[in-house]
Amino acid sequence: MGNILIVEDDPNIRKLVRVNLIKRGYTVFEAEDSHQALALFQSETIDLVLLDIVLPGLSGVDICVWIRARSDVPIIVLSARSEEELIVAALDAGADDYVTKPFGQEELLARVRAFLRKSYTTKNASDTKIQIGEFLIDLEASRVFIGNEDLHLTRTEYAILAELAQHADAIVTHNELITQVWGPEYRGSNHYLHNYIGRLRKKLGRYSNLLETVPGMGYNLHIKNQI
């Protein structure tokens, strides 16, 4: 099923999440502070991290930076609604998703399933690179470049862009994107997708106009008539 590391200093939340994950067949490792978290990440094979954003010692943002320097394992941040600035900092540091406390266990489990089942590699080994002028999407390496600059996209940002690139010059609907990136249980969560599209456009910089919004329908990544 998968090995999941829970990094959470509240023992009640940690226990509740652990029990529900174990019931679904996951192997669970627990850390109550940053020291334990880093030690477990180095000693065990971890497939996904559930990371509290406020911890004793290093913060969740610091842990995101540390993990991203070593791995592309999915990171889902757990945070209170009042910690919006920290959520943004964690996403910028490489976190893939977030849930706000108090959260429903089924919502959290759905996100865990979505990240663990999703493979962002191409099905055809001969089509591992998509070139759009200076804009390069390397599907095999899961990296995106403008010229020699690596855009350092998060896993979710990359998944959205890769899906659009593989259907370039065609409209990909909101629900099609949501289903491919997060899973069918998220269909209709357009506001969630819009948040990530905005972040993606910011990182694309001068190339952001390649990504067109089609009102009421979805998005279109243009290859023709490039900048």
Image (spheres, grey):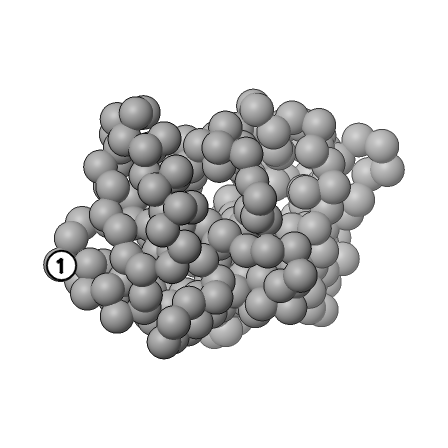
In which quarter of the view is residue 86 placed? bottom right
Q: Please, is residue 160 above or below residue 143 in the view?
A: above
From the viewer's side, name the closer residue of 79 and 88: 79
Q: Amino acid at mark 1?
A: Ser
Q: Residue at x 29, y 44 (%)?
A: 4
Give the labeled residue for mark 1: 43
| Residue that sits furthest to the left in the current view | 43
From the viewer's side, name the closer residue of 119 and 116: 116
Q: Residue at x 47, y 74 (%)?
A: 148
> Which SS class for mark 1?
helix
Q: Is residue 120 left or right of residue 174?
A: left
Q: Tell how many labels.
A: 1
Q: Please, is residue 71 above or below residue 2 in the view?
A: below
Q: Please, is residue 15 above or below residue 154 in the view?
A: above
From the viewer's side, name the closer residue of 189 and 5: 5
Q: Residue at x 57, y 48 (%)?
A: 101
The quadrant of the image that shows the C terminus is bottom right
Q: Residue at x 57, y 44 (%)?
A: 102
Location of residue 24 in the rendering, given as x and y in whole percent from the top left corner: 31, 25
- Looking at the image, can residue 209 be seen? yes
The quadrant of the image that shows the N terminus is top left
